[in-house]
Image: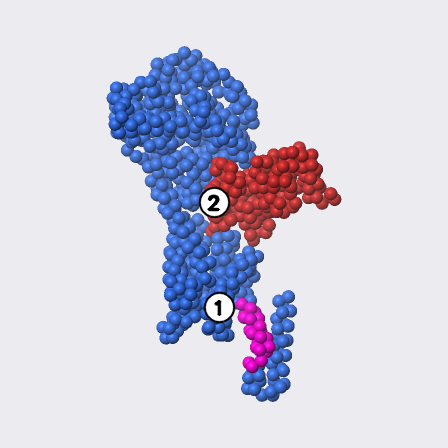
Amino acid sequence: MAGSALRRLMAEYKQLTLDPPEGIAAGPISEDNFFEWEALIAGPEGTCFEGGVFPARLVFPPDYPLSPPKMKFTCDMFHPNIFADGRVCISILHAPGDDPMGYELSAERWSPVQSVEKILLSVVSMLAEPNDESGANVDAAIMWRERRDEFNRIAQRLVRKTLGLSA
Amino acid sequence: MQLLISSVCMALTSAVIGNAYYQKQQFYPAVVYITKSNASMAVIYIQFFVIVFMFGKLLRKIFLGTLRAAEFEHLLERFWYALTETCLAFTVFRDDFNPRFVALFTVLLFLKSFHWLAEERVDFMERSPVLGWLFHIRVGSLLTMLGILDYVLLMHAYNSTLVRGPTVQLVFGFEYAILLTVIASTAIKYVLHAAEMRTDTPWENKAVFLLYTELVIGLIKVVLYLLFVVIMAKIYALPMFVFRPMFFTIRNFRKALNDVIMSRRAIRNMNTLYPDATPEELRQSDNICIICREDMVNHSKKLPCGHIFHTTCLRSWFQRQQTCPTCRLNILRTPTINSTVIPRAAEEPANAAAAGAAPAGVQPAAGADGTVINPAAAGAPDAGQPHPNGPAIRNPAVPNFADILAEANNLRNEMSNRAGIPPPPMISPFMMQPPFGYFGPPLVPPPPMPQDLNTFSEDELRAMEGNLRTHIEERIKMLRNISIMVDSANILMQQYQGIIARLPPPMQVVPPNPDATAVAAPAPSGAAGAAAADPVSASAPVCDKPSTSRAATTEAKPHEGQVNSVAISSPVANASEKVTIEDLGAEEDLNPSTDAGSVDVDSEDSSELSELRKRRLKFLEERNKSPTATSDKSD
């Protein structure tokens, strides 16, 4: 009998494979290591990220689901809640207790009830509606707030880039 | 690259040796020639390191096979730190510096790296889906070999220190002692993991064993480090090179200690406070522990908020956070059953039978006359006289509303367990959808009704008047109670906001029996409407989810007015945001008309709300009066 973290990850993988939510695909990079996943997230329709397919990597801690995984986009991203290196900054990924931005309620934080699916769905909604209060990428936050056109143009360029089209 | 370096090195060594033989022709003079020449010695040293490296690779191939990327990364990281520390150690022992000394440190580093790798491998056991026999043989032999080597070297250092007094062997002896503790903890972990793997069911107490292992080993290490620092500081200089590992050891020990304390507290809470979930409860929920996503067959606990989890899953979560994973109810604010609450609960014997049975048992019960009517009274078998006007809130010993409220839920759960009565029917739909359960009735603790501040008894008034210490204390108590009421109203507001946001349209809400509305409407207050409430209680079991939420809403309204200035702060404002996050992963069968519902409810005028509220209060009154009737119905 393997560890509980592994069993839970296997269960989630099975669930995600049997009944995948729309616009999301995720699974372990290799079946030997269930603690590193790759996810593909489709940009939500009706937003500036529409049409894009964004790859990301999820790294799970050994004590998952007691601690949240880490998520990082492996493509270029320009978004108020994504760091320049691709790390995603949303409250659902933060363990209660640590508060990097100093504004989150503990009720929004990670809890074992959350799952990969919920994380990815949260990320999709984050793509659709950036939270410009928390500045993981301050430039993007300001541009989102003040020069939406320019932001949209950059986002569209990123979308084309992820699709392998020339910018 | 490595191949290139080793072949270049090999070539250089052969060149040096060949050159020496060529010049001296004989073995002995050649050896003397090489040792006299610095350049030749440098080549020989480098060759020596290359050989050690290759030997290490060979051993790794034998005992560990190929390293995973993470293992290699960690090894490299730790190796560089260890190397720096070794260089620092050289500064202390600069007088003893000679090839033998360097060789000893090389051996130490070499062994250390294998200790780290063994540790990583054993940690990885828990995370790998399948492990063959090869793995067990490898790990077992590696651990045995390292253990024996550590022991031999430790003994050697010990003897040498005894014979020759304190030398650099002190450092080695200490290092090998530390490594022995590492081997010990790794071996224990390996045995625990292996034991768990042999069975098909998760081994519940493994986490506890691991925790205590960590604690004991941590303690031994800390003692060793401290001892070493003291001895070194006395004989040589302050050993700078152990400060980093010492710091980490102490930090780990502190964490382990903290974990053990938290774990003990969690276990105690779980054993004493939370009832085991009954088979019925398990059947009514979807029988899956939301933490590990596995079936709950046995050993599951029910929290005061009604959520059920595996005992072990809960325990490991409680080590980090003392909240319910689903609804984040703070369980530490749910105290043990204390004397101040139970007697009061016993004052309401009428509640007893109704509590577990009537659907409204789910609902927070509150009397209109300022009494907290405790639906949990059922838990108290020795119920006393009916006492509808008990000054519950004014009871000076009442610690905290949240405590009382959670307690009430807790007691109720226990009650239903004991009696084998299935939990109130309205809980079940919520428990089947844990994300949704966040907003379900079980979470809403009984709202404390505002205390009637108009009617004080003479004694109470006298107690608060005057300048004596007791009077002032009495007044402070009073104020504190008021502040508690405001606080709890605040908490309730937040929960109600959540409920309101996802209510179905109010039209479905009207109870099937129209008489109930008609009769209830004119009732001036809860107490007066007792006679009229019969149809209401009759229709109660038919009430469905919407009506429950609706009732909660109606109660939320009066509180809104009461706490207007306090409650409308950021938490409330954020409530809707919270909903969306929880919402994301919720099941498909969420009511599609959520949005419409919330709008409708919000736009309702207050007269209708107060009317509903009156009806509800009356219903509760009635339920108290006729416990048998309601319990029969729910059966």
Q: Nearer the viewer, residue B405 or B90?
A: B90
Give the chain letter for blue.
B
Answer with the quarter of the image where residue B15 lies.
bottom right
Q: Nearer the viewer, residue A66 or B79?
A: B79
Is residue B383 among the parts visible in the rendering?
A: no
Secondary structure under tag 1 reads helix
* Chain colored red: A
Tell me, yes or no, whether the highlighted magenta stretch contains residue B43. Answer: yes
Q: Position of residue B513 (x, y in %)?
A: 44, 16
The amino acid type of the residue labelled 1 equals Phe
Magenta: predominant secondary structure element?
helix
Give the chain of mark 2. A
Give the Cα separation between the discs numbered 1 and 2: 43 Å
Q: Amino acid at mark 2?
A: Leu
Image quarter for residue B621? top left
Q: Nearer the viewer, mark 1 or mark 2?
A: 1
Q: What chain is tagged by disc 1?
A: B
Relative to B625, residue B113 above or below: below
Residue B357 as seen in the image, left or right of residue A136? left
Question: Which mark is drawn over residue A162?
Answer: none
> Which residue position is annotated with label 1?
B90
Residue picked out by circle 2: A66
Q: Residue B600: x percent and y percent?
A: 53, 20
Given the current orientation, which residue lies at the most extreme right position? A166
Quadrant, the C terminus of chain A: top right
Q: Is residue B620 above or below residue B303?
A: above
Relative placement, left or right, of B582 versus B312 is right
Q: Write down the region rendered in magenta.
A: B35-56
Per the image, label 2 sits on a secondary structure element best described as loop
